[in-house]
Image (spheres, helix red, strand yellow):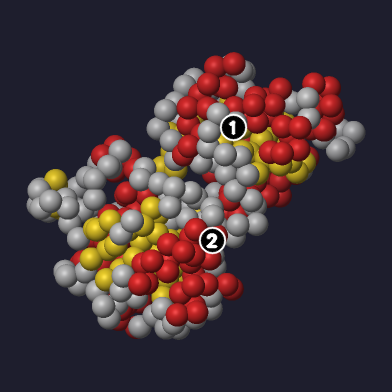
């Protein structure tokens, strides 16, 4: 494995760049090189940390068959293009671009390198050499919303989001609908900070939600900073992407853990075997991609039972929080009684359900 970062990569040029990315072992040329483009630092203990654990799983499973490299802290803008291009030029046969904002950049670079395979996480645009993959995080949000709706004393819940994109909107709605199953009067106040990883900004937004009366806050950003604020204030929240209980042992009730290893191993093996094909994969609890961390002892027995019921329903395919009737913020019926939203509808969701309020 070769470790890179965006700054060192962009400083290098020409032959110097080539040399800086060559594998560190004499037989590296015999290996299939696989690249990862990461949004944040691998030490964020959330989204990027989970993807890097998946990369490490590839190393462990495929051993001498592959060499993995990664670039961290890559912005979701045009500056991602030369990073992806350089990875392709250095011999990567498969490149994972691990955030929604890399979608168009991935497609642009993929056109330049038709023999290189690309996989874009959480996106929806594909090509012959570009696959997409995602995780049904909303299934985990349904578990968190169930706990919050059952245990909240105020009925006012907070949701700290990054950007108003379908993935985040979907998470907000799953959380809100699940909370309202336990408390029909529950409201969810949302703050978007226009960043995935910005601990000071995440902390400040959490303070805002607390000041608005939220006694539970769930986060769709990547650092443990919100949980640390909740810990200080004696309130509750949930980890994002990984078990963050070490940072807030009292406030952290559970977390959605992103388990990317099995998928990365499968796709890397396909490159080794020459069987890779462009696909669209959206796995969830039943596939082991979405896992709920152990419950904190503070979660009541009744809340545990209700949360486990939601988990069991998703595992059995007998439950879906997006079953109508569902109304939007204006009270307009968007999903009729008994109807279940399709995955295509969920993947493009751009409206909030009734009871969701903007706090920013």
User: Which of the two discs, 2 and 1, sits closer to the camera?
Assistant: 2
Residue 104 sits above or below residue 209 on the image: above
Q: Nearer the viewer, residue 151 or 354?
A: 354
Give residue 34's quadrant in the image: top right
Residue 75 sits above or below residue 233 on the image: above
Q: Residue at x 43, y 62 (%)?
A: 205
Residue 203 horizontal/vertical position (percent): 49, 65
Is any atom of residue 283 visible in this view?
Answer: no
Residue 105 sits above or below residue 349 on the image: above
Residue 27 horizontal/vertical position (percent): 86, 33
Q: Which dot marks residue 200?
A: 2
Residue 358 horizontal/vertical position (percent): 28, 56
Graded by Cα atoms within 10 Å as few (under 14), some (14 to 19) or many (20 or more), the crowding at tag 1 reads: many
Q: Secondary structure at mark 2?
A: helix
Q: Nearer the viewer, residue 12 or 30?
A: 12
Q: Is residue 119 left or right of residue 34?
A: left
Query: Which residue position holds label 1?
Result: 80
Image quadrant occupied by the N terminus? top right
Residue 210 horizontal/vertical position (percent): 37, 72
Q: Is residue 77 left or right of residue 173?
A: right
């Amino acid at each position: 494995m070769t470790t890179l970062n965006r700054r060192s990569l962009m400083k290098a040029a020409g032959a110097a760049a080539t040399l800086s990315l060559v594998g560190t072992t004499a037989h590296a040329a015999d290996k299939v090189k696989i690249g990862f483009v990461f949004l944040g630092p691998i030490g964020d203990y959330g989204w990027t940390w989970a993807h890097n654990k998946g990369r490490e799983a590839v190393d462990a499973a495929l051993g001498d068959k592959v060499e993995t490299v990664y670039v961290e802290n890559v912005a979701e803008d045009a500056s991602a293009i030369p990073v992806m291009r350089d990875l392709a030029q250095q011999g990567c046969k498969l490149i994972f671009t691990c955030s929604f904002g890399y979608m168009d950049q991935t497609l642009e670079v993929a056109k330049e390198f038709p023999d290189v395979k690309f996989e874009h996480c959480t996106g929806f645009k594909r090509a012959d050499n570009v696959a997409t993959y995602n995780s049904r995080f909303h299934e985990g949000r349904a578990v968190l919303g169930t706990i919050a709706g059952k245990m909240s004393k105020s009925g006012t819940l907070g949701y700290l989001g990054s950007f108003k994109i379908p993935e985040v909107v979907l998470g907000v709605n799953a959380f809100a609908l699940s909370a309202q199953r336990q408390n029909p009067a529950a409201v969810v106040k949302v703050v978007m900070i226009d960043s995935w990883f910005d601990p000071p900004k995440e902390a400040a937004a959490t303070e805002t939600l607390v000041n608005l009366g939220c006694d539970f806050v769930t986060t769709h950003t990547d650092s443990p900073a919100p949980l640390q604020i909740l810990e200080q204030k004696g309130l509750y929240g949930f980890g994002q992407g990984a078990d963050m209980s070490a940072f807030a042992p009292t406030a952290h009730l559970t977390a959605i853990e992103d388990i990317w290893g099995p998928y990365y191993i499968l796709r890397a093996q396909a490159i080794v075997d020459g069987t890779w094909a462009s696909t669209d994969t959206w796995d969830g609890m039943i596939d082991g991609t979405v896992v709920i961390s152990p419950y904190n002892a503070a979660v009541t027995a009744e809340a545990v039972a209700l949360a486990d019921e939601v988990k069991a329903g998703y595992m059995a395919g007998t439950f879906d929080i997006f079953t109508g009737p569902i109304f939007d913020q204006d009270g307009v019926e968007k999903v009729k009684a008994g109807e279940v939203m399709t995955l295509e509808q969920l993947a493009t969701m751009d409206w909030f359900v009734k009871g969701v309020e903007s706090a920013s």
